Image: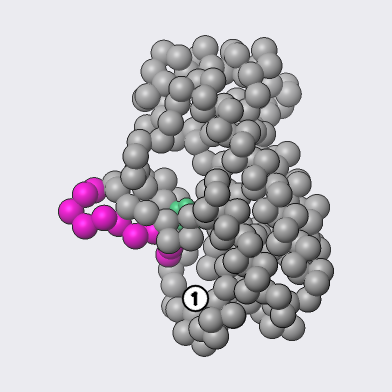
């Protein structure tokens, strides 16, 4: 958590030439993320379910959609370092299928790797594995990955029952709304991650 706070302070510092309203948005976004990360931490503590150390399976195959607003912190750093030309070329050639562009596989260790932008990762990545969605009857369903399901084993049903009895778990849609509330509709629409970053750079350059 400290590294994330430090990273956001750095973003605010990098972006001090950005418009004041963009800095306020970055700060509000960080507030939603801190709230969510604490929420997930409480859920993990109660259920004793945690990701395997260094596991990057979800980043290997997932197609991440995010809002340009969520990429503004990263875009502020890129623009501050005057690397926008390089990044624009990179983003124009990147594939949105398969492995995330920010995931680096560990050589010779299948399924293990790291996220290069971990403290600034978007909401979808933060929620992954530790969130619920509501079904049409208003009941919460734990949405998680196959590895965590395996780890939970027979507790999986018990956890779902506990969630509906009051065990607190982040509801993906509610957090998405909190983020949505921060930006304009153009900044909040969901795009594949590289396109969202491209758009965020354009927003800051206007
Ligand atoms: S941004 Fe980071 S956490 Fe999200 S999918 Fe890419 S590598 Fe994984």
Q: Is residue 114 above or below residue 23?
A: above
Residue under the image location 78 percent in, 76 percent down: 19
Start and end of the magenta stretch? 101-110
Instruction: State whether label 1 is within 8 Å of ligand 1.
Output: no
Q: Quadrant of the C terminus?
A: bottom right
x then y, percent, for residue 59: 41, 51
| 73 to 110, vertically: above or below | below
Q: Is residue 127 left or right of residue 21?
A: left
**Relative to 63, does residue 168 appear above or below in the rendering?**
above
Circle 1 packing at 10 Å, graded few (<14), some (14-19), many (20+), is some
Q: Is residue 63 magenta?
A: no
Asked if the magenta segment contains residue 103, the reply would be yes
Residue 100: % across, % down: 43, 59
Viewer-nearest residue: 206 or 19: 19
* Residue 200 in sight: no
Residue occupied by mark 1: 91
Callout 1: SS: helix
Coloured how? Answer: one colour
Q: Tell me if 112 is positioned left or right of 66 in this view.
A: left
Q: Residue at x 30, y 57 (%)?
A: 105
- Residue sitting at 21 percent across and 49 percent down? 109
Residue 11 visible, this orientation: yes
Main SS class of the magenta portion in the image: loop
**Name of the residue lying farthest toward the left:** 108
Q: In which quarter of the view is residue 99 placed? A: bottom left
**Residue occupying image coordinates x 24% and y 48%:** 110
On screen, residue 176 above or below 168: below
Left or right: 5 in relation to 87:
right
User: Of 168 and 153, which appears nearest the observer?
Assistant: 168
Q: Nearer the viewer, residue 113 or 81?
A: 81
Image side of residue 206 versus residue 152, left or right: right
């Amino acid at each position: 958590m400290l590294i994330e706070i430090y990273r956001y302070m750095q973003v605010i510092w990098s972006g001090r030439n950005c418009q004041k309203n963009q800095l306020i948005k970055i700060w509000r976004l960080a507030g939603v993320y801190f709230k969510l990360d604490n929420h997930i931490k409480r859920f993990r503590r109660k259920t004793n379910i945690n990701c395997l150390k260094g596991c990057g399976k979800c980043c290997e195959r997932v197609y991440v959609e995010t809002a340009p607003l969520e990429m503004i912190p990263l875009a502020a750093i890129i623009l501050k370092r005057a690397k926008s030309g390089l990044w624009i070329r990179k983003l124009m050639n990147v594939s949105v299928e398969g492995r995330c562009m920010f995931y680096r596989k560990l050589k010779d260790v299948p399924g293990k790797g790291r996220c290069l932008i971990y403290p600034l990762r978007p909401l979808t990545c933060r929620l992954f594995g530790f969130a619920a969605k509501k079904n049409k009857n208003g009941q919460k369903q734990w949405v998680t990955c196959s590895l965590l399901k395996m780890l939970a084993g027979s507790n999986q049903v018990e956890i779902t029952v506990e969630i509906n009895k009051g065990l607190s778990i982040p509801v993906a849609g509610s957090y998405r709304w909190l983020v949505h509330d921060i930006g304009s509709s153009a900044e909040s629409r969901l795009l594949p991650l590289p396109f969202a970053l491209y758009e965020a750079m354009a927003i800051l350059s206007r």
